Amino acid sequence: MAKSIESFIAGLPKTELHLHIEGSLEPEQMMMFARRNGVNLPYASVEEIKAAYSFKDLQEFLDIYYQGMSVLQTRQDFYDLTVAYLKRVHADNVRHVEIFFDPQGHTERGVPFEDVIEGILDGLAFGEAEWGISSHLILSFLRHLSEDAAFETLAQAEPYLDRILGVGLDSSELGHPPSKFARVFAAARDKGLKLFAHAGEEGPPEYVWEALDLLNIDRMDHGNRSMEDPDLIKRLATDQMALTVCPLSNLKLCVVDDMQNHPLKRMMDAGLKVTVNSDDPSYFGGYMNDNYGAVTEALSLSKDDLAVIARNGIEASFVNEDRRAELLDELDAYLAMA
Ligand code: HPA
Ligand code: ZN
């Protein structure tokens, strides 16, 4: 890739709208937390951990991801994890983040919900004070668990509703369609929460339709397989439904066989509102600039394409209007001199 486009990406003010904080756990940190908490890992070294990160599908990744997060046990751990992530994306000039956390992955191991959410919220507050990165937190339900379990988790979140943006839906997609969670999403909406769902990552276009029509989501995570259904493409374009696309994730989880076949550019050409994000950067081999760089190189994106993607990220975020104006000004100032 030409140096100039690389440095253009590096300086571009960016938003990250699809990031699982547990997926930012770096192998070095995993070893450190394991030592600190007396957890036995099935790996003897950072190299062994990295060697395990080869996945043929989403489930193979998830098995390793849930095992990895077992080293996170205290409020301090969640704080440290969040601060480390923000420090890393500050280096990528990320200006606003909306991050997921998976409370059920922790409460089912006996970690109190309060310790998880308070550690993360304190970390986000530090990131804003230290690096000026604004943020929102999204509580994600694990879709391989029951809807009743999701309702229990929503009840645990009750004291924190003014400090979370919304709810999401992640984990094993196939066999767990959005319709399974229609009631709990309606309840979350009644509480004033925004709604997000992973759909069309491995699941068929029908799951994307369900996320739109049964869950009434505000933003779609992934959405890749929407491209198989022309009516769905039309619907997403007409509604200007934002999609949080995660290129390196798609490659690592074999959602695409080659980055040159990634649908991002075809999505843009079809009028879809796409954003670029990192998903689980420590497992998938790259943070924000790496994701922008990988699709830019593989799909020959222009600076204008990248500016559209960065602008979509600001428009698809749920910042207040003052902050949105600030972020748009920052982007416009950058584009004027780039
Ligand atoms: N897909 C579904 N669930 C997840 C992912 C993902 O890419 N990352 C963390 N949980
Ligand atoms: Zn995800």
Image (cartoon, grey):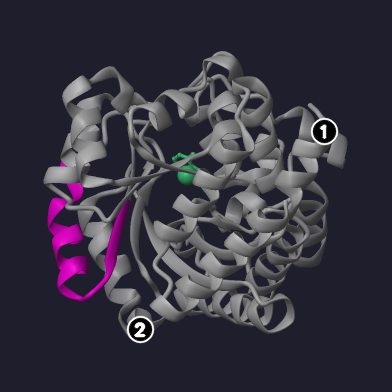
Tell me the quarter of the image containing the N terminus: top right
Please tell me whether residue 191 belongs to the stretch shown in magenta: yes
Query: Which circle, 1 or 2, is nearer the viewer?
Result: 2
Q: Which image quadrant is residue 186 in? A: bottom left
Is 336 on the left-hand or right-hand side of 175? right
> Relative to 289, is 165 above or below?
below
- Place of residue 126 in the rendered image (x, y in percent of width and height, measured from the top left): 67, 81
- Place of residue 300 in the rendered image (x, y in percent of width and height, measured from the top left): 63, 23
- Place of residue 104 in the rendered image (x, y in percent of width and height, measured from the top left): 42, 59
Residue 177 seen from this side: no
Task: Say whether disc 1 or disc 2 marks the residue closer to the N-terminus.
Answer: 1
Q: Which residues are magenta?
A: 177-196
Q: Do callouts 1 and 2 mark residues in contact (Cβ within 8 Å)?
A: no
Which residue is located at x 27 percent, y 24 percent? 204
Is 214 on the left-hand or right-hand side of 2? left
Judging by the rendered image, the residue that carries numbered circle 1 is 48
Please tell me whether residue 183 belongs to the stretch shown in magenta: yes
Circle 1 SS class: helix
Neighbourhood count class around disc 1 (C-alpha, 10 Å): few under 14, some 14–19, many 20 upward: few
Q: Residue type at mark 1?
A: Glu
